[in-house]
Image (cartoon, rainbow, N blue to C red):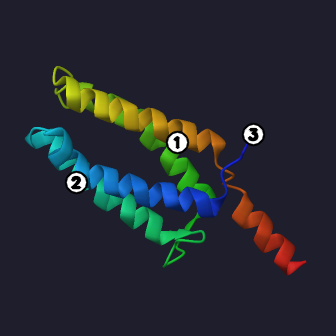
Amino acid sequence: MKVISPRTHGYFDFLTVVIFLLAPTVLGLSQLPAMLAYGLAVVHLIVTLASDFPFGMFKLIPFTIHGWIERLVGPSLIALPFIFGFADEETARNFFIGVGLVVIVLGFLTDYQAVERDKNLANS
């Protein structure tokens, strides 16, 4: 059930960047989780702007690959607190797990094939 269009997914991508940028201050994250959040905001913004979908500026990454990147990112976000040793920091741990779960759910609900289908229809 792919109910999220590429355009709607783009809004979620920019919201994710903002959440990663605000989380360290709003949640009072310690240094390592904060630096990871800032770094992830930058990486997520780059991937979003480089993707071939309505909000992509550079169209270098096919939207299907964008989807595969997010399929890897979601579980990775859940693992980060345990890999980097801040799982005992409840707020940081719960933030990364929560964002990871949201990324996974959005990944299941996004139609990553829509851009290619639209291109094929336009070329027909």
Instruction: Please tell me which of labels 1 and 2 falls first in the chain.
Output: 2
- In the image, 90 versus 58, the foreground residue is 90
Tell me the quarter of the image containing the C terminus.
bottom right
Q: Nearer the viewer, mark 3 or mark 1?
A: 3
Query: Across the whole image, how many numbered discs are drawn on residues?
Result: 3
Left/right of residue 44 with respect to residue 88 in the rendered view: right
Residue at image mark 2 = 38
| Residue located 66% across and 51% down the image | 4
How far apart are labels 3 and 1 at the CA level?
16 Å
Q: Nearer the viewer, mark 1 or mark 2?
A: 2
Amino acid type of disc 2? Tyr
Instruction: Please tell me which of labels 2 and 3 falls first in the chain.
Output: 3
Amino acid type of disc 1? Arg
Where residue 32 appears, as percent x and y from the top left, is 13, 41
State the image quarter where residue 42 is shown: bottom left
**Secondary element type, mark 1:** helix
| Residue located 56% across and 43% down the image | 106
Residue at image mark 1 = 71
Q: Residues within 10 Å of mark 1 (few under 14, many from 20)?
A: some
Where residue 107 appears, as percent x and y from the top left, is 58, 43
Residue at image mark 3 = 1
Left/right of residue 98 with respect to residue 60 in the rendered view: left
Task: Name the outermost residue toward the right.
Answer: 124
Q: Is residue 62 above or below residue 13?
A: below
Asked if one can make out residue 101 in the rendered structure from this viewpoint, the answer is yes
How far apart are labels 2 and 3 at the CA level?
32 Å
Amino acid type of disc 3? Met
Tell me the quarter of the image containing the N terminus.
top right
Q: Residues within 10 Å of mark 2 (few under 14, many from 20)?
A: many
Q: Is residue 77 above or below residue 11?
A: above
Asked if one can make out residue 83 in the rendered structure from this viewpoint, the answer is no
